[in-house]
């Protein structure tokens, strides 16, 4: 792990996930007891439960619980996001918990899941169809208890086994709420699954994160008020700032907690900690680098203006809060910027 840790200060932690070792899931954590499953835990909740992790599900696995029981389940309160980094995985989405046969979704590289809590988003692996090659995915969520092996899942997660479903009288089929569209593999009121590689890049509109910076985005999730929570973000070659004031700068966010996972390209950033006038510490963004940054003084950061990106870079970025990006509505109040 020490080789993988690129930076740690009061507020920021950056790791190279490619040099981390895969680990067996710990007892009372997600995927514990699932044969062959591996994890790299990247960030934890204040209570210690995994908050962001890479997960490997091997081929031939058709359920994710230690007892090996085929099931579907839903989460009462937690919203969950998953990005498929490699491999393939057949999966079933259920529009209601006792739907007899779920809707098959075949996950592949670049697909992204946004799952709201509640009965309308029951889901599970495809019973009897464990897939051929397994998959590696990046998962993050708003709270713990979503995996059956995880502490607290008895309160958070409602499990219905296949046996229970098929022993009960079949409910009347309900009209399907499934829709699709360009770049959307599957959508219901509670679940959206994007095929991000088939989505178009957009120039952020006025008031949206990174408007006017040259960045392009694919927005992946929004909050109830429509503010961006997660997006796929591309910065062009030559970028020598994150856009605040349109010139080299360093800044921190007053309230926004953010996470970044680099997918492609290269960029050099600098983390200055509390010392906004010092040289900072250079960290090279490459595929597989993960960053967690908490808000507040001590979190000064910026692009390394002496080493503008030669080829641009592409990352997933998500956050709690709004106003942290240049060009975004509220950015003047949220950011403390020093040129
Ligand atoms: Fe789940
Ligand atoms: Fe920032």
Image (tube, rainbow, N blue to C red):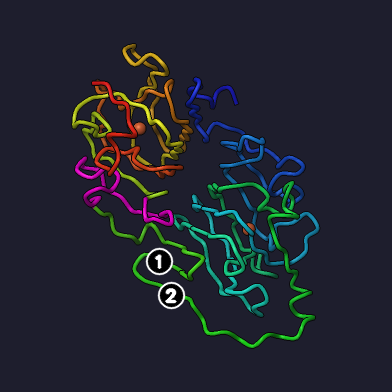
Q: Assign a secondary structure to mark 2.
A: strand
- Image point 43% across, 57% down: which residue? 224
Where residue 44 sits: x, y (%)? 60, 36
Of the residues under marks 2 and 1, which one precedes in the sequence?
Answer: 2
Is 208 one of the magenta-colored residues? yes
Q: Which residue extends farthest front?
A: 333
The residue nearer to you, when weighing 243 against 322, is 322
Q: Residues within 10 Å of mark 1 (few under 14, many from 20)?
A: some
- Image point 37% across, 56% down: which residue? 226
Q: Which residues are magenta?
A: 203-227
Q: Assign a secondary structure to mark 1.
A: strand
Mark linked to residue 184: 1
Instruction: Decide if residue 157 is on the left or right side of residue 104.
Output: right
| Contact, mark 2 vs mark 1 (Cβ under 8 Å) | yes
Quadrant of the picture in which ligand 2 is shown: top left
Q: To which residue does mark 2 refer?
A: 179
- Secondary structure mostly seen in the magenta stretch: loop
Q: Is residue 83 above or below residue 44?
A: below
Determine the CA span between mark 2 and mark 1. 8 Å
Where residue 229 sits: x, y (%)? 42, 49
Query: Which of label 2 and label 1 is nearer to you?
Result: 2
Q: Is residue 36 above or below residue 76?
A: above
């Amino acid at each position: 792990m020490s080789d993988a840790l690129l930076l740690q200060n009061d507020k920021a932690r950056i790791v190279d996930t490619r040099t981390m070792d895969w680990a067996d899931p710990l007892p009372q954590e997600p995927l514990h007891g699932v044969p062959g499953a591996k994890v790299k835990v990247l960030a934890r909740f204040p209570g210690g439960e995994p908050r962001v992790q890479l997960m490997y599900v091997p081929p031939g696995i058709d359920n994710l619980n230690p007892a090996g029981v085929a099931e579907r389940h839903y989460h009462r309160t937690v919203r969950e996001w998953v990005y498929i980094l490699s491999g393939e995985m057949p999966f079933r989405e259920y529009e209601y918990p006792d739907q007899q046969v779920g809707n098959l979704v075949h996950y592949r590289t670049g697909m992204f899941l946004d799952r709201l809590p509640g009965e309308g988003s029951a889901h599970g692996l495809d019973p009897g169809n464990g897939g051929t090659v397994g998959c590696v995915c990046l998962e993050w969520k708003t709270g713990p208890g979503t995996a059956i092996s995880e502490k607290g899942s008895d309160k958070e997660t409602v499990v219905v086994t296949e046996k229970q479903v098929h022993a009960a009288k079949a409910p009347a089929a309900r009209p399907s709420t499934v829709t699709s569209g360009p770049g959307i593999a599957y959508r219901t009121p509670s679940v959206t699954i994007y095929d991000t590689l088939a989505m178009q890049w957009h120039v952020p509109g006025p008031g949206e994160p990174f408007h006017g910076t040259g960045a392009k985005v694919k927005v992946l999730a929004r909050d109830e008020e429509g503010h961006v929570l997660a997006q796929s973000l591309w910065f062009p070659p030559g970028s020598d700032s994150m856009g605040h004031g349109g010139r080299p700068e360093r800044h921190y966010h007053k309230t926004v907690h953010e996470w970044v996972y680099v997918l492609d390209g290269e960029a050099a950033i600098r983390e200055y900690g509390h010392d906004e006038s010092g040289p900072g510490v250079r960290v090279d963004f490459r595929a597989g680098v993960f960053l967690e940054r908490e808000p507040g003084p001590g979190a000064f950061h910026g692009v390394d203006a002496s080493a503008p990106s030669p080829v641009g870079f592409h990352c997933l970025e998500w956050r709690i809060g709004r106003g942290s990006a240049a060009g975004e509505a509220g950015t003047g109040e949220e950011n403390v910027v020093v040129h």
